[in-house]
Image (spheres, rainbow, N blue to C red):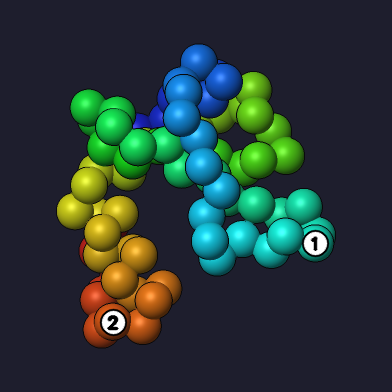
Amino acid sequence: MKRFPDASALTAWRKSSYSESTSGGCVEVSDGHPAGVPVRDSKDPHGPAIIFEAPAWSSFVAAVKGNGGSFSG
């Protein structure tokens, strides 16, 4: 896992389908980054992003969806 200091420098952010639409508490991800999957808090678009390695992100998403994945990141 890496930290990117200014998430606004990355492009193509999309809100997670698991984020709450009414409270403003949203997690956004960006696709196509060579180092992995950047994740940021939508309330702080100029704040940091955490970049997960692709296998760790896939494992996390599978666990959230309940597909029996176990997070190993």
Rendered image quadrant of residue 62? bottom left
Q: Is residue 57 visible?
A: yes
Rendered image quadrant of residue 70? bottom left
In the rendered structure, find residue 42 and report the number of the disc placed on it.
Answer: none
Residue ID at (19%, 53%): 55
Question: Mark 2: which amino acid?
Answer: Asn
Residue 1's place in the image compared with 47, above or below, is below
Q: In the rendered image, which residue does mark 2 sit on? A: 67
Evaluate if marks 2 and 1 touch, with contact meaning CB atoms under 8 Å apart. no
Q: Which element type, helix, strand or loop, lies under badge 1?
A: loop
Expressed as whole percent of the image width and height from the top left, the position of residue 25 reads: 71, 55
Q: Residues within 10 Å of mark 1 (few under 14, many from 20)?
A: few
Q: In the rendered image, which residue does mark 1 sit on? A: 22
Question: Mark 1: which amino acid?
Answer: Thr
Question: Which quadrant: the N terminus?
Answer: top left
Question: Which quadrant: the C terminus?
Answer: bottom left
